[in-house]
Image: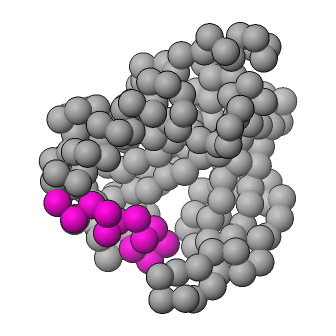
Amino acid sequence: MTSADTQSFFPPDGWRARSFVLRSWRAGDGAALFEAVDSSRSHLRVFMPWVDKHASPEDSERYARDACARYLTADKCDMAVLAPDGRVLGGTGFFGHDGWLAEGMGEVGMWVRADEAGKGLASRVLAELLRWGFTDWPFLRLSWRCSGDNRASARVAEKAGMRLEGVLRSYSVDPDGTRHDIQLYGIQRHEWVAR
């Protein structure tokens, strides 16, 4: 896909895998999103302080609607990870800086609800995101960041074939002032194809 093509690029509606669906958040998703976050609050808060922005179903509904608008304009493409029955298993997405799609470079983010953690879901979702990103999206390179303290997240990136490209020392700051290193992983389309 050329730079000119990305100017008229519209994010695909979604991606169906064997055990889950990836799609943009939508109006009406707030209650299910809130349930997933609220039931996993202590699990997620360790590495994702944004959970406290979801203090009510209304907060989560507002987020879902805002995320849908950003998805439609390809500004930031936050997505739901849904079980076939519609249960929210987590969230993921593609995002980047201004001009990210035209440059073919994006970053992947992800969270998984507590009762699904440790079952291989994150690895399966990342594998599908890479497949989708390097086929239906204009990505030439995708990256993944995680706390240096989050070994499980690092393993997910490594299992997907992403390479550790560097460590951003003392880069992340918790609300209590604690600082953490961030590990940066990446994979290019030609490397993914070769796998």
The residue depicted at 62 percent of the width and 11 percent of the height is 8
Image-based side of 64 in relation to 175, left or right? left
User: Image quarter for residue 113?
Assistant: bottom left
The residue depicted at 49 percent of the width and 19 percent of the height is 12
Image-based side of 99 in relation to 51, left or right? right
Q: Tell whether position 13 is magenta.
A: no
Which of 140 and 160 lies nearest the eye of the viewer?
Answer: 140
Quarter of the figure that contains the C terminus: top right
Q: Position of residue 170 (x, y in %)?
A: 72, 81
The residue depicted at 84 percent of the width and 30 percent of the height is 190
The residue depicted at 17 percent of the width and 60 percent of the height is 56
Image-based side of 145 in relation to 17, left or right? right
Q: Tell whether position 46 is magenta.
A: yes
Q: Position of residue 24 (x, y in %)?
A: 39, 32
Quarter of the figure that contains the N terminus: top right
Magenta highlight range: 45-56
Image-based side of 177 in relation to 86, left or right? right
